[in-house]
Image (cartoon, rainbow, N blue to C red):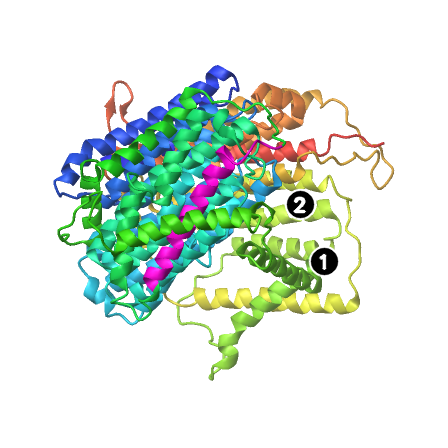
Amino acid sequence: MSPLALVILLPMLLGTSLCFWSGRVQTPARRRLTAWLAAAVTASALALLLAHAPDVFEGRTLLTRTDWVAAIGLNANFRLDGLALMFGLMITGIGLLIILYAAWYLKPEDPAGKFFSLMMLFMAAMLGVVLSDNLLLLVVFWELTSISSFLLVGYWGHKAEARAGARMALAVTGGGGLVLLAGVVLLGQMAGSYDLSVMFERVPQIHAHAQFPLALVLILIGCFTKSAQLPFHFWLPEAMAAPTPVSAYLHSATMVKAGIFLLARLYPVLGGAGLFEAIVAPVGLATMVFAAYVAVFKHDLKGLLAYSTISHLGLITFLIGLATPLSAVAAVFHILNHATFKASLFMTAGIIDHETGTRDMRRLAGLLKYMPWTATLAMIAAASMAGVPLANGFLSKEMFFDEAVGAQRGLAWGVLVPLAATLGGICAVAYSLRFIHDVFFNGSPKDLPNPHPHEPPWLMKAPVALLVVLCVSVGIAPALTFGPLVHIAAKAVLGAPLPEYHLAIWHGFNLPLAMSTVALAGGVAMYFALQRQFKLHLHHPKGWTGRLIFTHAIDGLFALAGRFTQRLENGSLQRYAAWMIGFAVLLASWPWLTVSGGAPGTGTRTLLPVSPLALVPWALLIAAGAALVLTHHQRFRAVVLVGVVGLVTSLTFLALSAPDLALTQLSVEVVSTVLLLMGLALLPQTTPRESSGVRKARDVLLALAGGGGIAWLTWLMLTRDHDSIAWYFLENSVAKGGGTNAVNVILVDFRGYDTFGEITVLGIAAVGVLALLDGFRARRPEADAQGRAWSFERQPLMLRVASRIVLPLALVASVYIFWRGHNLPGGGFIAGLVTAIALVLQYMALGQDRAEALLGAGGGRRYTRWIATGLAIAGLTGVGAFVFGRPFLTSAFGHPVAPVLGELPLATAALFDLGVYVTVVGATLLMVSALGAASKERSA
């Protein structure tokens, strides 16, 4: 297996599984164990990256390639260069510190298993983003970061602000991900490949393409939404409803840095065309100044830090957009510096909230005497954020000012750049000073929920202290600490050698130093002027905000949807079906209505003779259909007649030499009939007669048009010769699939993706039935329509005895059908249905409670585990192919010789088929259980 893939899979599979298992028990010991397991997995991923770091520092790029879905260009290709190594170390290194911090931050009532499992999933998604060499694979991980961050932000689901913040974050970043996908598809089509290593070699071809500007804009929108750049910045402050360890991780090393990473990663492909620089630099500078100004007026600690994060992300975006070699160095350097001081500040904010019960700076004051160590750490980290000398933030901000001065020579609006940069620096000092002064000085605390704050445990402060020491170390000796990592990362960003530069504390008296001095003095003056003259604590923002615009837009969208719904929906299923069938008939007829020459006629293909025996099922089918139309008001009779139609379909498959389909259809008919009857038992036996004459005439016309149209299209297809792909499956079923039953080989090998998707949908449908009927109870009728009393007594003895005989026989038959399926008619789906039918019979013979007790179903709830187990078996079978360097769901087969048994035809596809079997059984029984539970209540 690829070592880079292992870095991702460790937290994704091992980390999530271990944390979920350990966190199921909410004892202090198990909670600590869960945290240590998460930390151990993270440390292992970090160690794997460090093991390959020497090669990267020597200038080599580690590339691994594994085919996945090569037909569409989606491959599991990974790369480790300087940029990927830097981000990977940030994700795992800071992630390790935050996990240790979270072990002390979470309260006893917070589910540790859920938290650390989601952290592992999010970490894996971020590692996938930074290590992917294939852009389609990167987008897959990109969207996984949106989903996992949605779950993390909404971790405290009982809080309305957490739910709202999670929805907003998912809407903005998920929507941006879809736009990004469109841009990536265009870029891949222009380059002829989705692999970055190929794109880097075809830059002139990409820039010369007519669709390059469109692809560039779409990709930039995706980056801006993820990294909270104007005008998509508003979601990030709303995500502060997440637990503080999540906020620290999202802001310092992961979520919001994903957009920055992609800008840097694609700079060799997108940069240098002029349009990239013209969009990215102004957006970054505007975001930097705007967010820095807003941060000054935020009263919530995390709100202030959130806007400061947006500002610093704007600073980095601006540097990337300048498209000069030294601006790339400055951008990379500030990415590292920002990660260190922002993670430490967020964890400090969490400590303050943890000890005082509030983050409101209007209530916090004078905490220095209660928490001196925390105050000292916070002062150093805030000094770094403000750009005070001897802290790492000062160095990268000096480089930012230097690049801003140089930018005025290359931009039409360049004279404004140094002024805007200085203004942003002034605001940064002001909000950093406010963070310290309002919390640790400025009088005494006011009405704290916890009136006796104190220092947290040392293990909670240790991660903060380590990061603060790093801030000072880098500030004093940048070339010895971050210097080598900055060099290889900046070189990867540019895709070319770097000019000579020096990371040092002192570069002499120059304009950037003057700008830093102005920013420091101006920031101090700004804060105290606002505090004393304008009463900063009384400030309340007014007017339109990004959040307000988004909320109004969503409300308007729902209102518009509601108006459409009111006009189109009246609760009549007939009306909905009429609209769908009518439009389908219109769309299908449109080509022939608008093309001269009329509709095509019968083709020239030689037709098969009609067998007299075939006339019998045809006549039965017509009779059943006619009876169904005439008696459809009687629900039970309608179900039986639909079953007759299914039976005739099974006979048709059998006549056409398709025994697999015939067995499947027959089994599906039995199971669906049982489920339909159980569902209809909750409803009246007849439907009301409410159709008018006009509606009946409409329905007759639609039925004739729809049914006649389908029959006509079928006739046109069957009477014409066509090229079939059946020969491919028949010729390769044994050679490439290891089985003589082409149908089963198609399902579990050639089109395994389709089957995996189908069983996933089946599982979702079953869980949906459970969710819809959970807690629902329908009163049992006392008598039928003729007044005959219903009996709910114990099941008949004959049925109970018969079920005991049928079950083992059915299980043996299922095993036989399952094992022969790869070479003879059968397989996991059919075997699963046979088993489900036998178990449904147990429900009928023993009653629901007794049957579920014997099956250990936990009142039916544990069937969800059966579904999950089946999906996991099928999915892991596909993932297992990666271990041998083969695409997902690639099967292997052989014919080993065993004593006594002789030659055994074996294929790994049988494991996939086992997953199908377990999922089908679990989904069927879950629906039976949910429907049965809904009819348990007796009539009043």
Q: Nearer the viewer, mark 2 or mark 1?
A: 1
Q: Quadrant of residue 193?
A: bottom left
Of residues 649 and 876, which is closer to you in this image?
876
Identify the element where label 1 is drawn: loop
Q: Tell me which label, 2 or 1, sits earlier in the chain.
A: 1
Q: Secondary structure at mark 2?
A: helix
Task: Kindly identify which residue carries mark 2.
Answer: 640
Q: Residue at x 48, y 44 (%)?
A: 304
Q: CA distance from mark 2 to mark 1?
A: 24 Å
Q: Position of residue 392 (x, y in %)?
A: 29, 40
* Type of amino acid under label 1: Ser
Tell me: 442 left or right of 308. Answer: right
Image location of residue 922, percent across then percent down: 53, 32
The answer, for residue 46, to whether it is visible in the render is yes
What residue appears at the point 60 percent right and 60 percent down from the top-left corner?
557
User: Would residue 143 be seen by someone viewing this image from the given angle?
Assistant: no
Instruction: Give percent across and percent down for residue 4.
Output: 25, 37
Residue 288 in the image: above or below residue 144: below
- Residue 572, numbered circle: 1
Q: Position of residue 780 (x, y in %)?
A: 79, 34
